[in-house]
Image (cartoon, coloured by chain):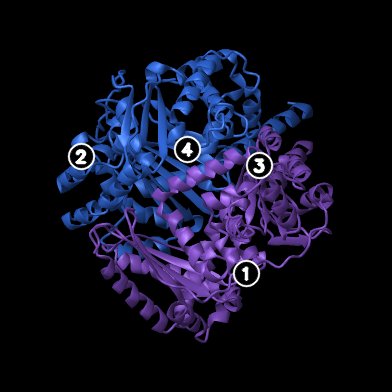
Amino acid sequence: MNQKQKTIVSIVAAVVIVGAVLWIKGFRHFSEPVSIKNGLSVRTSLIRVKNNSVLYVKCRFRDAGVLQNSADKRGISAVLGLLMFRKINGLSPEETKEKLLELGLKHFSLHTFEDDFEISFQCLEDKAPEAMRFLSAAFRRPEFTKNDLEFAKGAFPNLLEVDVSSPQELVLEKLMALLYPSHSYGLSNTGTDQAISSITFDDVDGFMKTHFSRDNLEVLFVGNVSRFDVRRYLDALLTELPAANSPQPAAEINQELSEEEASVINKQNMEDVVGIMTGVRIDHLTDAERAALHMLIDTLYDEKIGDFPSGLRSRNIANSVGHFFLRRSLSNVFCFFVFVEKKDLEKYLEYLEEKSNQYRGMTDFGKLEMAKDYFMAQFHTGFADLSDVEEHRRINALPFSRVNGRTLARVLLKLFDPSKTRRVIIGNAVKPSTRTLP
Amino acid sequence: MTARFLLLALLFSFRVTFGQSPAAENGFQEYKLPNGVKVILLENFRLPVALVGIIFDVGSFDAPPNKNGVASIVAANIVNGEMHRRLKSLGVSYGVNPMKEYTEILAQMHPRRLEEFFAVICGNISEISVENLEILKKQMIVDGKLASHQLNHILENVVCANVGAKNANIAGGIFNEKSLSSITGDDVKRFFADRYRDCRLAVVVVGAVDGDTLKKIMGTTLCKLGRRKETSANVFQNRDFRDIHIKSKYVDRGVWYFYHIPQRDSAAASEEFLLLLNWRLFDFFLKHDRLIYDYDVRDVMNRGDRLLSVCLRPRMDVPMEKLQMAYDVFVHRLCKVAVSDEYLGKIAKLGYQEEQFARSNLSEVYANVRNALLNGRAADSIWRTEKNIENLKGGRLKSLAEKILGKGLAFKITTRYKSDK
């Protein structure tokens, strides 16, 4: 080997070494199964954020949320959520919370009101190993007695009362029942009085055993940690969590919507304001269609640029307006709601019908280019809070540049499909409208 | 030899490139532009994002008599349709928040969009065009009627009325159908010209922006705004409060305790007092979690004298009186308990921990800086130092607790559920 060849080999070797060091130090984000002790693996994602002393962790048990609870035990996930970190390692509730503080664990949040059971928290990186070891006991087996269960159930009257007093919650609940008849998605997210009171100690225990295993768990880390750190934390946190428990798959979704297309709720204390919520069910979306949907919603429903009947452009009909998108594992719902004065209700519905017809047949998408620019411009930014980083990356990873006129037209048809749309109106002594659905 | 040298050079360059972290936070940079605009920057290169707040020291409290609601109309028009389109095409997410004491444009963007953002804002900040005034007013009326289902909104109005009983400006926080209908487009423009152009304007930037770049951007954008006057804000100073009881159809029920911190004590130790109160309330919550469903502590007003509220929401099966008795005992103990150095040490430890969390959340840093500004404090005061804790030794925290909790209870609002006696 001559000198020149030696030089080339050395350079290649150096590049390989540098690459290996970079890989080991975990400079890249990843999302893949990570092997932990006992030869098992956990689906794990890491988003690396440098210069940061706080670690954000999210553990998601798939299909263990309220939406997967049976009708007669609706709310069992939420009840379990209140008990899971109440007592750990034989400590009392007060001692447990003191210990969590001492270990630098903060922003503890349990989200149980959707498909999945999500536990998220933030901890100081230097205390992370100890914090994970402490929490592992709660993952393995939450400690609670029958008394604790009664305590947790006692918190529900507050939640249920809020639901029945809020016009938005009332219409949403009814709308879901119309969009998903005889499916879990059509039932109340909070639970019902009857179902909550019937939950027993054995129910909660059985639910834990069925739904909480490493096999239906995904873990996300956001922080200044490497691949090695991630494996260390997973070992500490999850080694004692049982492996396969054969979790029940989510109930299949039925295709039919309710025969009733629109419904009216009477609420006396609404004065002369009427609420209208329209929901469209969209069962399947490709990634490009999802990107197109973001663009359509962002432009059409924008108060200052969209001329959909929202905001200030709705023909002198004052209204308070909003929209949201429910992303669920089996189906999606786009909801659009407005509140108008009662005297303007028919005028508004007429306008809604006219505009929907116009948009359904839309072929000129020039205006949507701006929404494309908006999402493309946001492509590399992150949000200011660690807990938002994942959601932001998820949206930005959608293929906005691939969206073309055909994709937009296809999604518009789904967005304004009358056969998949239902409407609920709420107000004081409101009569059902004769207007057809958009 | 050459190969070894190359290898060493490569490894060395790796060390230089990756061994160093980008510039970390180096404290706040605070300065004033020649036209009086205050600029505060905290460099933080953790994420490729810049959080920008443009804060006008004018809010709904500043509305002229009988023109309540005019500040909200200004906020809705401060970014017009054309500006909105331009900001969106830059990938800027933003909101305009009309508050009681201030109005802010709060935006998030990629740092390389900062210059264009300021150019768009500055090109339009000097005057206001009023679009769809009548529709906007009607919309505010609809929102107001809907808010009859949100207890927080009602409480806010009740608080404004109570605090403003002897202060017409503060009563300006409340708008209704009558006050809105009297507002004309000229009123909006006049209010904007009188107050917003000559208010104390501040710009707070937190994120991946270096000081020199920001100074350059300010030189070509905000520096070109007309000179802004140093105005004295209407301060809230009122000790003549009254307790309020609401028995209503609303399902949310609870007790709101309002504490008054005189201006002279606001800046000094009130942050440590807040930490003490938060921490002890957390203990209280743990000990009484069979009584309380939820609680929170917050600043209701910052300008001048400070007003804090502690809200306790009992569980549905708990009589209100039982909760109030437990809280009275808690306050009594908090006032009387000797504040030892050990106790202060614990507060300090907790404070530093809180600070690390706050630093990881740019929005929290921004909100703390904005509140410090409104309190007339330096931005640096949001970080806890040994000096803070030293200042509290010798019973100072205890006397402050006694003063605020014992004698300083301004008033109380109790909302009862329909089934309560």
Calculate the distance from the C-alpha at mark 3 to the C-alpha at mark 1: 34 Å
Q: Mark 1 lies on which chain?
A: B
**Residue pointed to by mark 1:** B235
Marks 4 & 3, CB-CB < 8 Å contact: no
* Residue type indicated by callout 2: Lys
Chain for disc number 3: B
Q: Note whether B132 is above or below A280 in the view shown.
A: below
Q: Are marks 1 and 4 on the same chain?
A: no
- Is residue A390 at least partly visible in the picture? yes
Residue A311 falls in image quadrant: top right
Work out how far the residue at label 4 is from the one at label 3, CA to CA, in angstroms. Answer: 25 Å
Task: Report the amino acid beneath label 1.
Answer: Val
Q: Look at label 4 and name its amino acid.
A: Ser
Which corner quadrant of the image does residue B288 belong to? bottom left
- Residue for badge 3: B109
Which chain appears blue?
A
State which mark lies toward you, 3 or 1: 1
For mark 1, give the secondary structure.
loop
Query: In the rendered view, would you say B177 is above or below A329?
Result: below
Name the quarter where the N terminus of chain B is drawn: top right
- Please report, as a chain letter, where disc 2 is located: A
Asked if marks 3 and 1 fall on the same chain, the answer is yes
Give the camera-side residue of B323 and B75: B75
Q: Do the residues labelled 2 and 4 touch (CB within 8 Å)?
A: no
Circle 1/circle 4 CB separation < 8 Å: no
Quarter in which the C terminus of chain B is drawn: bottom left
- Identify by letter the chain in purple: B
Q: Nearer the viewer, residue A384 or B77?
A: B77
Q: Are marks 4 and 3 on the same chain?
A: no
- Which disc, if any, is residue A45? 4
Residue neighbourhood size for the residue with mark 4, other residues' Cα within 10 Å, grouped as few (<14), some (14–19), many (≥20)? many
